[in-house]
Image: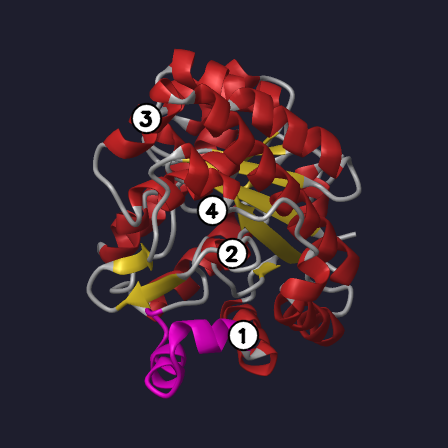
Amino acid sequence: MSAFIDACYKRSTNYTPIWLMRQAGRYQPEYRVLRSKVSFVELCKRSDLAAEVTLLPVRQFGFDAAIVFADILLILEPLGVDFEFAADHGPQIKRPIRLSSDVDAIADNVDAAQSLSYVMQTIRLVVTELGQATPLIGFSGAPFTLAAYLIEGGSSRNYALTKSFMYSDPAAWDVLMRKLVAAIVSYLRAQTNAGAAALQVFDSWVGCLSLRDYQRFVMPYMQQLFEQLGQQVPVIHFSTGNASLYPLMKQAGGEVMGVDWRVDLGKQWDVLGDVAIMGNLDPVALLGPLPELRQAAQAVLDAAQSRPGHIFNLGHGVLPQTPIDQVRALVDYVHEKSQRRTP
């Protein structure tokens, strides 16, 4: 068993495992060269290229886990939603949801293993290459974050359209969330069957909600998602931007809670109690001088206090302007400074 998987289950490890969200991406020269030749969507759908991109950071830096190269919006295609990645504006939904009738147009049943077979092929290629040495993480967006994309049509500052839809038509919201849960469960199960050793559910936008709104409009669907997934592999439950939601998210499900850099990891872990925790270095720390980066990394390790169940990560993804030498230095530092004897 790997240190990463052991940590997911709160088992003691000889050192703190580390991987980084967006560890494959624009900060890597090799990735930029590849992207100059193919579009982002083509890169996701070309399993041979997506597998190579997935493997590259593991080979370069010695991460303790790989994460499949894909995008959270890919699940929308089999749901009947057209989208595109605009160079200057990010992902754009071509026909955003505005009315309950728009929800009716979303597909009821998704066979993700078939409709997203290129993701499964990428997973199989990566697992074949990695063997048992390094586990692969599969992932999906969470129902709220995907719903927000569908309703806003792209990124948003205040999510006014999404919240207005929730408040004004809770019945249609319920239908939409149930459809998304079913699709996500199909997608994540297919990734597990293809060889993913762990999963991550990204609720990147849920931090915009109040506690009351999370309890009413999100938590029941997250509980359904985790109950339907079962416990075949460990699941990381991640969000950012609102630490007050973490206790409710823990109740919703997941073996690992991913927390952002805005909280003290140790104090947050005390609040959450019996769960593994992932995080939580500020991604911008990788842009600073090396001594400052090491101090910031040490502060995260100190906050975790070598408790079983800590997975070192950033509080969000690697920034495109991050120097690759800084990434290498961080991985080496965490591996070296967290060395310990297993009781």
Labels 1 & 2 near each other (Cβ < 8 A): no
Earlier-in-chain disc, 4 versus 2: 2
Q: Residue furthest top?
A: 212
Residue that appears at 22% across and 32% down: 158
Question: Can you identify the residue that label 3 sits on?
Answer: 163
Question: Can you identify the residue that label 1 sits on?
Answer: 45
Which residue type does callout 4 highlight? Asn
- Above-or-below relation of 105 to 251: below
Question: Can you identify the residue that label 2 sits on?
Answer: 80
Labels 4 & 1 near each other (Cβ < 8 A): no
> Where residue 141 sits in the image (x, y, percent)?
50, 46
Neighbour class for label 4 at 10 Å: few (<14), some, many (≥20)?
many
Which residue type does callout 1 highlight? Lys
- Asked if residue 59 lies left or right of residue 203, the reply is right
Q: Secondary structure at mark 3?
A: helix
> Where residue 20 sits in the image (x, y, percent)?
47, 54
C-alpha span from label 3 to label 4? 30 Å
Residue that appears at 35% across and 85% down: 33
* Circle 1 or circle 3, nearest the eye: 3
Which residue type does callout 2 highlight? Gly
Question: Can you identify the residue that label 4 sits on?
Answer: 313
